[in-house]
């Protein structure tokens, strides 16, 4: 690999690893909050057990998210000094405020973990709420730097110098709201479907244990309900994202849809792959006029094609496949939620069929894969720019050598950390099975 590709691969691998824990770090606290609210409303002790166990899992994930996030921050400075020069002068506010968001999350996480049984119910809910807000705020603030890369604002570069700096204009850049909303909604969706996947797997294993099956069934329905709501909201936000690309990054939208010629009544290409030679999307299903409608809420909206831009500005054309995979996964997850709701609430069936359980088991990993595809699409689709139309990625990269060695070493570190977190989960929850907590609650109820 050449120097630039090695640097991008190293940082991309770091982010791909970190995003797993960062996403669950936003999604799981919301699930804990919903479980806590259901417990306070219904007094069903099962939801309290869910909240407690999910909090323990969240704490383990946080133990990996913090060091991997620190590595990402260090690599930003070491690998992209040109980019960080701009960030340091223009866009440092999100990093400064994020410290306080993390402080709120850590403080109230400690209160909830160590004092939940000794504080009033309203204080328990308040603590979890602030944990969720802190986690969500951290994600929004860090994501804002990515939004700034795509729609830079609040400064100019004149004769190689950064001038007319307005930090708040940079902070509230044009894509801030849409990008932050998309990241939060997709994280909430992913956290819910990971919970649903685990519950579905446990239900298959506990099919003959009615008490255990009932417990995991409640977790499954909570996960599918929350996941379904946020998958729908994510799809609606995706429509806003398409309009944002149409206005601010038209070549990225064109690459996402494999559109080469500028046209009104542009079709939406589903599936297939983009062929540069024939300038078409082969094997795609085209829905007439839909891309124009998504871009501008009108079928006669003119969508700019790739041929209107210099070819060196074109993003890699494989982003069409990434975009389709992300959207396809989102639609599948929404479908699973609808089937689960109909089966449980409309048909009133107490048990779920195996043909449904296996797709639900795959829902959590698929949701996480959708997050990965989305981030790769967002960052790769912006190429060749690190700051859109202002600084190319090759201008921001470090001139340090031996990045290939670092790439190998960090990859080994991430593999080790991933294995370690799996073993910790297996050890802790293996020694503290949910059956023990259910039996303890049942014995207590009998004594009372």
Image (tube, grey):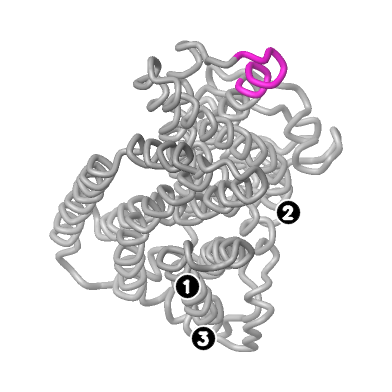
Counting every numbered tag in the picture gives 3
The span shown in magenta is 340-349
The answer to whether residue 221 is left or right of residue 418 is right
Marks 1 and 3, the one that precedes in the sequence: 3
Residue at image position (50%, 26%) is 214
Looking at the picture, how far across and down is residue 203, in whole percent?
A: 42, 23
Residue 207 on the magenta segment: no
The circle on residue 102 is 1
Looking at the picture, how far across and down is residue 379, in whole percent?
A: 48, 53
As helix, strand or loop, the secondary structure at mark 1 comes to: helix
In this view, the mark in front (2 or 1): 1
Residue matched to label 2 = 247
Number of residues whose C-alpha sits closer than 10 Å to that of mark 1, classed few (under 14), some (14–19) or many (20 or more): some
Marks 3 and 2, the one that precedes in the sequence: 3
Residue 345 on the magenta segment: yes
Q: From the viewer's perspective, is residue 17 above or below residue 292? A: below
As helix, strand or loop, the secondary structure at mark 2 comes to: helix
The circle on residue 89 is 3
Marks 2 and 1, how far apart in space? 34 Å
In this view, the mark in front (3 or 2): 3
Residue at image position (17%, 51%) is 416
Marks 1 and 3, how far apart in space? 23 Å
The secondary structure making up most of the magenta span is helix
Residue at image position (61%, 69%) is 152
> Observer-nearest residue: 354 or 213?
213
Q: Tell me the quarter of the picture where residue 123 sits.
A: bottom right
């Amino acid at each position: 690999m050449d120097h630039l590709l090695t640097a991008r691969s190293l940082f991309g691998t770091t982010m791909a690893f970190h995003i797993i824990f960062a996403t669950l770090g936003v999604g799981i606290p919301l699930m804990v909050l919903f479980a806590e609210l259901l417990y306070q409303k219904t007094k069903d002790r099962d939801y309290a057990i869910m909240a407690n166990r999910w909090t323990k899992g969240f704490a383990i994930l946080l133990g990996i998210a913090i060091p991997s996030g620190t590595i990402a921050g260090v690599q930003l400075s070491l690998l992209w000094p040109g980019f960080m020069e701009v960030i340091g002068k223009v866009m440092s506010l999100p990093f400064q405020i994020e410290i306080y968001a993390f402080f709120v999350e850590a403080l109230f996480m400690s209160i909830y973990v160590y004092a939940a049984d000794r504080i009033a119910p309203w204080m328990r809910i308040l603590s979890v709420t602030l944990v969720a807000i802190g986690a969500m705020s951290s994600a929004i603030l860090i994501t804002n730097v990515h939004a700034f890369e795509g729609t830079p604002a609040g400064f100019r570069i004149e004769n190689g110098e950064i001038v007319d700096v307005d930090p708040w204009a940079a902070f509230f850049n044009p894509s801030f709201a849409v990008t932050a909303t998309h990241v939060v909604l997709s994280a909430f969706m992913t956290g819910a479907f990971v919970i649903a996947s685990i519950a579905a797997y446990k239900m298959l294993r506990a099919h003959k244990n009615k008490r255990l099956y009932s417990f995991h069934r409640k977790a499954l329905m909570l996960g599918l309900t929350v996941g379904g709501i946020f998958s729908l909201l994510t799809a609606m936000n995706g429509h806003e994202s398409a309009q944002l690309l149409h206005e601010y990054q038209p070549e990225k939208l064109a690459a996402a849809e494999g559109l080469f010629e500028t046209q009104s009544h542009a079709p939406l290409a589903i599936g297939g792959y983009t062929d540069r030679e024939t300038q078409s999307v082969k094997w795609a299903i085209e829905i007439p006029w839909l891309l124009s409608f998504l871009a501008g809420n009108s079928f006669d909206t003119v969508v700019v094609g790739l041929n209107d831009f210099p070819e060196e500005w074109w993003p890699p054309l494989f982003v069409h496949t990434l975009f389709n995979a992300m959207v396809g996964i989102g639609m599948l997850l929404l479908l699973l939620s609808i089937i689960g709701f109909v089966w449980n609430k409309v048909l009133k069936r107490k048990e779920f069929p195996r043909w449904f359980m296996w797709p639900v088991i795959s829902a959590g990993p698929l949701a996480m894969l959708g997050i990965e595809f989305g981030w790769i699409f967002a960052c790769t689709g912006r190429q060749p720019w690190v700051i859109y139309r202002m600084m190319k990625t090759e201008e921001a990269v470090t001139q340090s050598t031996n990045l290939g060695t670092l790439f190998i070493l960090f990859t080994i570190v991430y593999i080790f950390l991933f294995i370690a977190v799996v073993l910790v989960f297996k050890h802790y929850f293996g020694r503290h099975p949910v059956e023990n907590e259910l039996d303890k609650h049942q014995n207590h109820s009998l004594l009372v």
